[in-house]
Image (cartoon, rainbow, N blue to C red):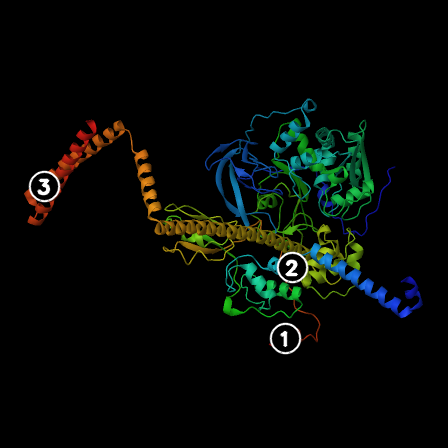
Amino acid sequence: MIELLTENITLAALVSLVGLGVLFGGLLGYAAEKFKVESDPIVEQLDELLPQTQCGQCGFPGCKPYAQSIADGDAINKCPPGGQSTINAIAKLLDVAAPSLDEEHGEEEIRTVAFIREDECIGCTKCIQACPVDAILGAAKLMHTVIARECTGCDLCVEPCPVDCIDMLPIEEDIEQWRWSIPKKQHRLIATSSSAVYETLT
Amino acid sequence: MRQLWETPGGVHPPENKVQSLKLGIGHLTIPQKLILPLVQHIGDAAIPCVAIGDVVLKGQKIASASGDLSAPVHAPTSGVISAIEDRPVAHPSGMSALCIEVTSDGEEHWIDLHGHAEYKQLSPQEVSHLIADAGVTGLGGAGFPSAAKLDNSRTRSIDTLIINATECEPYITADDILIRERAAEIIQGIDVISHVLDMPTRVLIGIENNKPEAIDALREACKSMAIEVVAIPTKYPSGGEKQLIYILTGQEIPSGQLPSDIGMVCVNSGTAFAIKRAVINGQPLISRITTVTGGACGINRNYEVLIGTPVSHLLEENKFIRKNCSRLIMGGPMMGFSLSSSELSVVKTTTCILAPSHSEIPEEDPQQPCIRCGLCAEACPASLLPQQLYWYAQSEDHERLQAHNLFDCIECGACSYVCPSNIPLVQYYRSSKGNIINSRNTKISAAKARERFEFRQVRLDKAEQAREVKRKARRIATEKAKTSDSSAADIINAANLRAKARQASPDQQKAKLERTLMAAKMRLEEAQERLVEANKSGSAEQQAQQHASVEGARQKVEQTKRRLEEVIQ
């Protein structure tokens, strides 16, 4: 056998290349099985970027299904709570141009938190069943209340309430949440700058 | 002579310290109203432990700490609690926060003070508890609760204690004057801190060489002790914790870590004084030395100010001329912030009230474009690239900002100071830091929401599965019952047996029937009364109705009687 190969160089090359191919093919096949990733990593990454309000405004029952749908080629501008910053982040991840928010699904609003007017609550548990993140506490015929820290502001609890005792209150900034803002740009001093010229004209 | 290391960058702004050093520490009259914010420190707000109308003594605790990272607040003078409500506080936002207002009675009645001159007989833990109880926080500017800092440091082995008497910021002379007049007490305070830290091997006092009197006073006070007073070259910001540690020891604190991670603790000299007063004299932190200076002030000097004194009161006694003042600054000209009103009060971190004249600190010149001159990079004491950070801050590129170590910026303002284009660089960095922290927090809460959502999903699925299993079992049972009669009979028999087994003993049955009888009799009586009433005044229809109900009640009574007899037999 070896004699045959040493004499016939073409055959030797053929055999060794085929051998190498089979060897590495096997290795790759083994690695693919051994290090198999359960879910689609892109879906996880997209889910990570979505705001997790679970509000369903995108038309999907939660953020994960929408992430799956984006991975399958859906539009990336259907998430009003995430707003433009989320769209930009997804666009960056997928390396596509960032569109503006699709207004069919809602507008970007300030973050709110649900508040139950407890005197009026009749204890029907409908809001508890509607809350996607179990942020409402209470029992049948007893008053309910929202755990404000866990509320995502999805407003899914507002509609089922038979006595309309749930308000969506904007989150007010207190002294602890206050942050410095970016300094305001002052007018440009370059005489030929278009804005400066325009301002002096008008 | 100790070897010193030189920090990169730094600036030399005009010192302007002479004005306020001509006079010693002054005392003010007691203001009529003192306003004490519940957050004067880094950490959680204190919780009020008094009510409106309570009479308090000087030094009495009026708000207690709410956790490990918090500090109590004490009444600075005797008087009455006149309000507990939101008031504007000394904060760059100009927003309001919960404050306690004390109306003074002018008597200055102290609580009973329990000093611990023999503190060395107490355990370090007990001493640190005394410090916490006295509400001592860092007096150099940041306001970190001192006991929390010492407790945290005690868990690691500390070999070096550094006392920060640098006071590198222009105008401020509070530490300088305190050292000149009360050096001995500061040294006692350092001893207390050493005791809490289990006697570190090195104790260094870092002080800039522009304070020769203070250096002499310190050297005199610690002559026979193993404390080294190190005069360092004057340069802003040598007083930054990380900078001072590097200057004195040549060691750098890794990014994101604390001095205690490399076995060091850095405490301000004013804080050491407050710790001495707290432990040895038993006095809580109710006053501090504050510099009142600037061209708009008639007198420039340091005062021992009660915490909570309104800034307006401080200025009034200082011959302040409103129209000469360009703006009111709390802290120094480099790291301080403008006050929106003079009705705010002095807090534990107020090192200085600066009221500069229009020529001293004029209105800011308009910001001009960055010309990439690189002066900021030369001035940065943390060796960062301020202009790069500036570009990334403008484009809100959080990743790049963090890659350029934004969080190592100590916000000293050296870059803004040297910038020829008047760019308020530090404000860009502060804003970016805030945005990054906000987006981190949103990420955390989003992750939590996801977890809760997924858990709920799993729970609902489980419930659905359980219901499905039950439904299946029921279907199978009915099908079985249909297919074989015998099995149906079996089921009925079994049910009957179960019912029998469940039947109560004769005694119980008897008792139950007696109760039923009693109730039936009562109902009969009621019905009869109603019938009488109806016969008197009701319509014919009502009478008939009542008659029927009396009849029904009578039958029920008889029926129950019969059953009772059966049971008895």
Label 1–label 2 contact, CB within 8 A = no
- x%, y% of residue B267? 72, 38
Instruction: Indicate the secondary structure of the residue bearing disc 1.
Output: helix
Q: How dense is the environment of label 3, judged by Cα within 10 Å: few (below 14), some, or many (20 and up)?
A: many
Q: How dense is the environment of label 1, judged by Cα within 10 Å: few (below 14), some, or many (20 and up)?
A: few
Do the dots labelled 3 and 2 sit on one chain?
A: no
The residue lying toward the viewer, choosing from B133 and A196, is B133
**Chain of residue at mark 2:** A
Find the residue positioned furthest to the bottom.
Answer: A201
Does the rendering let one see residue B524?
Answer: yes
- x%, y% of residue B315? 61, 46
Q: Amino acid at mark 2?
A: Pro
Label 3–label 2 contact, CB within 8 A = no
Say which residue label 2 marks. Answer: A41
The residue lying toward the viewer, choosing from B390 and A82, is A82
Does the rendering let one see residue A117?
Answer: no
**Chain of residue at mark 3:** B
Q: Amino acid at mark 1?
A: Thr
Query: Which image quarter is the N terminus of chain B in?
Result: top right
- x%, y% of residue B245? 78, 42
Say which residue label 3 marks. Answer: B531
Occupied quadrant, residue B39: top right
Q: Nearer the viewer, mark 3 or mark 2?
A: 2
Tell me the number on the disc at residue B378: none
Label 1–label 3 contact, CB within 8 A = no
Q: Amino acid at mark 3?
A: Leu
Looking at the image, which residue is at 29% across and 31% down? Answer: B504
Say which residue label 1 marks. Answer: A200
Query: Which image quarter is the C terminus of chain B in?
Result: top left
